[in-house]
Image (tube, helix red, strand yellow):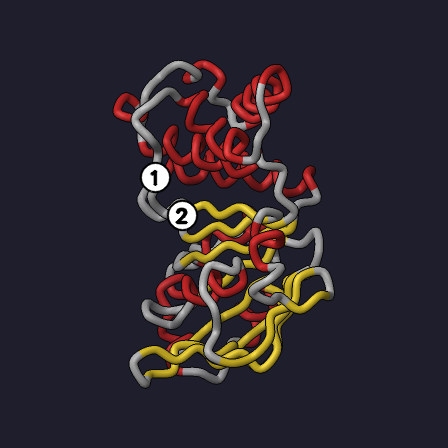
Amino acid sequence: MISVENLELVKEKRTILQIEKFELKQGKTQAIIGPNGAGKSTFLKVMALLEQPTRGKVFFAGREVTKKNMIAFRRRMAVVFQEPLLLNTTVFNNVALGLKLRGIRGDKLTQRVDHWLERLNISDLRDRKPVYLSGGEAQRVSLARAFALEPEVVFLDEPFSALDFPTRINLLEDLGHLLGNSGVTAMFVTHDFNEIPYLTNDVVVIDRGKLVFEGLLKKLLAEGVQNDTVQHLLSPFKKFNQIRLF
């Protein structure tokens, strides 16, 4: 669906990303994990066409992304960040925002918004303003706003990290069912191995801007990676046997 070749991103003479080849496959959900400062979120932004690499090529559905077609490709994606970034208006209007920007109005807009409010279990919050929402409710609104656009690809940049444990698990379970039934391609960044099995078995580990592992989570846990940083990242989860594999 989206792939990169010979990708390099340099900022202030420091190499942030250096990835020879990667493909986000259509209809699959891909987890991206790594230590703080590894380049996970930057990689997501490059894949989501929100940041341009210094060198290398990005392809969408087999076509190279250029300045001329970038906006058209970007309209086929949606991004959800750690902070919900909601406007001071009703939940309905927040979810409808992207649709209005794309010229959708009337009954079609109302039906689309109400559908996703129901899918994310927040129909009862339809007329509520963000100030009266919990963290989990606000993130559900953000997800509804993204999925209401009916994107081909969804990018999730640590959207669960600020939530308490029960709220996070409930949201992960709902999102896992949603992604599994929708056929949407997805990439999500996390720092918590325990989140991965709820959404996917496919994981990429990034360390210092490079891919050091790509494959199944079970394989990563069984065989490990010959990388001190990644071993350090895994050690607390292995030590307490915390990672839940479905």
One can see residue 228 in this view: yes
Residue at left 57%, top 18%?
A: 110
Q: Tell which of 125 and 66 is nearer to you.
A: 66
Residue at left 37%, top 31%?
A: 138
Image quadrant containing the N terminus: bottom right
Q: Which mark is residue 81?
A: 2
Q: Tell which of 167 and 42 is nearer to you.
A: 42
**Circles 2 and 1 in contact, beta carbons < 8 Å:** yes
Residue type for callout 1: Leu
Which residue is outermost to the front? 68
Name the image quarter holding residue 112.
top right
Q: Is residue 220 above or below residue 124?
A: below
Q: Is residue 207 above or below residue 79?
A: below
Q: Is residue 226 above or below residue 198?
A: below
One can see residue 246 in this view: no
Q: Which residue was labeled with disc 1?
A: 85
Q: Is residue 120 left or right of residue 128?
A: right
Q: Is residue 218 above or below residue 73?
A: below
Q: Tell which of 14 and 28 is nearer to you.
A: 14
